[in-house]
Amino acid sequence: MHAFRRNTVEHLDHFASVVLRHTSKEYPSKLDHVINDEGEVVAPQQLHPMFFGSFDWHSSVHGHWLLVRALRMSPGLDGQMPEIRKLFDCRFTAANVQVEVAYLGKPRRETFERTYGWAWLLKLAAELKLAAAESAAATGGTGGLSELGAGLARWDEAMAPLTQAFVDRYLRYLPKATYPVRVGTHNNSAFGLALALDYARIAKHTALETLIVDKARGWYLKDEACQAWEPDGIDFLSPALMEVECMRRVLTAGGGAEFVPWLNRFLPELAQKKPATLFVPGTVSDRTDGQIAHLDGLNLSRAWCWRNLGKALPAGDRRKGLAEEAYRVHLDSALAHVTGDYMGEHWLATFALLALTE
């Protein structure tokens, strides 16, 4: 497992192959679908021509994110780039985007995928922008974009109306969201803010960034002595560590010095490995059970949070070493289970890549 971490790029083709297998797998399908009339009783691919596979809409979205992240890290990708480019050329078209945007505009769909799917859509948009910019920089002065770079720019442009639709949803929703959602599943507010903030900063969307930062401060800045009553039996996010990860993004921007004092208040006994539950991976008793299998995702997303916390803490801070150890323990507990049963396989590679690369 440790060799896998040291050679992440060499193994990206495995994650990419997993995603490529399920992005076009329309069934089984779990829809978040408000049916307004009998005419809306249609197949998933008709509803969501961009993101119909991978069991559910959000898993398809973050599967596409994984493919773009993999291309960024390893443009050759063991010969899989042609298949990835073909997939994006087929999915990321003006016609498909128009269908996805129109779906959002129908009555009673304001809460569609709020906010987990929203966050992943913006994370995908951010990854496309980064990859396109890096590709352009790599070929600067050589006569134009590479074939991949041109594709990335084209997909980013095609997706822009859908990206804007979800930006608009955040801009409407956050001002009226009085309280955060602190669960360990899709509605977790800290996760949604963290990924949306990545997009706002990469896209230089100042209004969205300001709103997210202000909301995170309003929701979390005064939190103290977190008890970390987790994991829940269906968690794939740690409510405690996800809040830490969100506030790390918010409070360290521009060299800010607020994060460590906030952490001292929020988890005051972390140096004594308390709350102890945060250091112990969740037990997965049945990986064919879609909700119990969430706990593999919990271990991977905790690894991601621990890794980033370890990087954020100053040298000499005892918690830095504890975070690095917790990262290794959680990653090793789950990495071997990314593939196996479809109930985990359709999404776990994404969280593994987060833990390994971000």
Image (cartoon, helix red, strand yellow):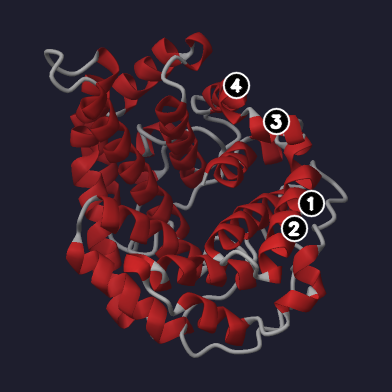
112, 314: nearer the viewer:
314
The residue labelled by disc 3 is 4
Tell which circle, 3 or 1, labels the residue nearer the N-terminal end.
3
Q: Residues within 10 Å of mark 2 (few under 14, many from 20)?
A: many
Find residue 325 and report its horizontal and vertical position in percent: 75, 55
Amino acid type, residue under disc 4 in the picture: Glu
Q: Is residue 35 visible?
A: no
Amino acid type, residue under disc 2 in the picture: Ala
State the residue at coordinates (60%, 83%): 264
Residue 61 placement: quadrant: top left
State the residue at coordinates (52%, 42%): 59
Instruction: Residue at the far front: name it.
Output: 316
Amino acid type, residue under disc 1 in the picture: Val
Tell which circle, 1 or 4, labels the residue nearer the N-terminal end.
4
Amino acid type, residue under disc 3 in the picture: Phe
Q: Is residue 70 visible?
A: yes
Q: Residues within 10 Å of mark 1 (few under 14, many from 20)?
A: some
The residue labelled by disc 2 is 326
Q: Find the distance from the CA under tag 2 to the CA under tag 3.
A: 17 Å
Q: Find the distance from the CA under tag 1 to the CA under tag 2.
A: 5 Å
The answer to whether the residues at label 3 and label 4 have Cβ atoms under 8 Å apart is no
Q: Find the distance from the CA under tag 3 to the CA under tag 4.
A: 8 Å
The answer to whether the residues at label 1 and label 4 have Cβ atoms under 8 Å apart is no
Q: Find the distance from the CA under tag 1 to the CA under tag 4.
A: 22 Å
Q: Element at badge 2? A: helix
The residue labelled by disc 1 is 329
